[in-house]
Image (cartoon, helix red, strand yellow):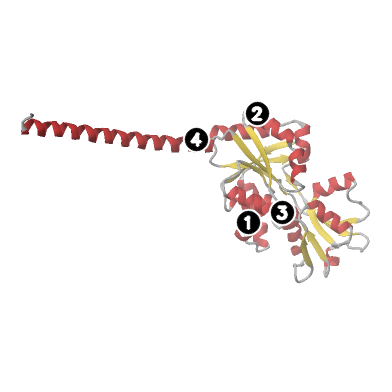
């Protein structure tokens, strides 16, 4: 039998050993948690699969099929899996960006400005055509009804695309505002969803006038979708910055550099064809301040529009 003194010493040693084991176990668990969180952050910043959103200007299946070349190009360039995504409308795309569900996104200028108010997406490239990274919008009228001037839009129906569209809403509405025409007072406005729907509505007389992107309108004429004898170009806007490619600001810096280079080096005509572009050039957020100024002129609530 151990003496009381030895028994006390042995008990102290055992307790000390247990405390040491517990302490080590706790430290390992804490380190493990830290490592786990670090791994998650690294994975999020440098994902193996990139979710890339494209504008819902046409049926989702059509947009994705048209951009299979871009998907393959980026997979090869970045050594990443790529998943193309097309939302039901502009607001859904903005919402997806705000939830951090998109790694890259191809926005319209206005939808980018709206997305910027509630997400960390940053513009890095815009399509270039004829050496420029700008484009225009047009206001068109129904030829049969003789809508060939802004004055004749008074009392008539004006078709716009999506509310978050730059060239089929923001810009043409500003063009009418400059002529003293306000929706609800001087004309009735309707939103038909897409640029081609605007042109078709005007051609068919369901709307007497409409606004859309000049490049898209030109393409519709060339394709024969719109009969140039049935519509009249009433006016064209000043140039505005082109549709931007954007990416999450919190992506790995090296990955961001590779993504930007991939777009700036892109010269494959088949990949560029759906964008009606010759290539892409660098842009930054301040290039879209002109769109923000238009919003103020029209007294638009960007926060409300982005919901």
Q: Residue at x 76, y 55 (%)?
A: 193
User: What residue is pinned by disc 1?
Assistant: 306
Earlier sequence position, callout 3 versus callout 4: 4
Q: Where's residue 291, x and y in %?
A: 67, 53
Q: Is residue 169 left or right of residue 48?
A: right
CA gap between label 3 and label 4 equals 35 Å
Residue reaching furthest front? 1
Q: Residue at x 75, y 43 (%)?
A: 61
User: What residue is pinned by disc 2?
Assistant: 77
Q: Do the CB atoms of the residues marked 4 and 1 lie less than 8 Å apart?
A: no
Residue reaching furthest bottom? 185
CA gap between label 1 and label 2 equals 33 Å
Crowding around mark 4 (Cα neighbors within 10 Å: few <14, some 14 to 19, many 20+) is few
User: What residue is pinned by disc 3?
Assistant: 165
For the residue labelled by badge 4, is the local secondary structure a helix, a strand or a loop?
Answer: helix
For the residue labelled by badge 2, is the local secondary structure a helix, a strand or a loop?
Answer: helix
Q: Is residue 124 above or below residue 165?
A: above
Answer yes or no: is residue 290 visible. no
Q: Is residue 64 above or below residue 209?
A: above
Q: Do the CB atoms of the residues marked 2 and 3 lie less than 8 Å apart?
A: no
Between residues 66 and 164, which one lies in front from this camera angle? Answer: 66
User: What residue is pinned by disc 4?
Assistant: 42
Earlier sequence position, callout 3 versus callout 1: 3
């Amino acid at each position: 039998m151990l003496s009381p003194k030895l028994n006390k010493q042995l008990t102290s040693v055992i307790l000390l050993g247990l405390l040491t084991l517990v302490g080590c176990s706790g430290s390992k668990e804490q380190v493990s948690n830290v490592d786990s969180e670090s791994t998650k952050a690294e994975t999020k910043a440098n994902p193996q699969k990139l979710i890339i959103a494209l504008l819902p200007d046409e049926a989702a299946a059509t947009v994705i099929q048209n951009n299979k070349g871009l998907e393959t190009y980026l997979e090869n360039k970045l050594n990443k899996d790529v998943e193309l995504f097309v939302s039901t409308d502009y607001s859904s795309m903005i919402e997806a960006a705000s939830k951090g569900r998109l790694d890259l996104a191809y926005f319209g200028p206005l939808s980018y400005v709206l997305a910027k108010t509630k997400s960390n997406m940053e513009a890095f490239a815009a399509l270039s055509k004829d050496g420029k990274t700008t484009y225009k919008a047009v206001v068109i009228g129904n030829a049969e009804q003789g809508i060939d001037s802004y004055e004749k839009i008074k009392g008539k129906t004006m078709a716009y695309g999506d509310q978050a569209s730059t060239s089929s809403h923001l810009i043409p509405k500003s063009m009418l505002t400059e002529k003293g025409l306000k929706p609800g007072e001087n004309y009735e406005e309707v939103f038909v969803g897409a640029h081609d729907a605007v042109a078709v509505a005007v051609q068919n007389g369901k709307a007497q006038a409409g606004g859309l992107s000049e490049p898209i309108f030109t393409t519709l004429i060339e394709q024969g979708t719109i009969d140039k004898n049935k519509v009249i170009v009433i006016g064209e806007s000043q140039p505005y910055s082109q549709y931007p490619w954007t990416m999450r600001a919190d992506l790995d810096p090296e990955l961001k550099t590779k993504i930007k280079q991939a777009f700036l080096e892109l010269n494959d005509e088949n990949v560029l064809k759906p964008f009606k572009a010759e290539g892409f050039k660098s842009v930054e957020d301040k290039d879209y301040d002109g769109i923000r100024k238009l919003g103020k002129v029209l007294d638009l609530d960007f926060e409300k529009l982005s919901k």
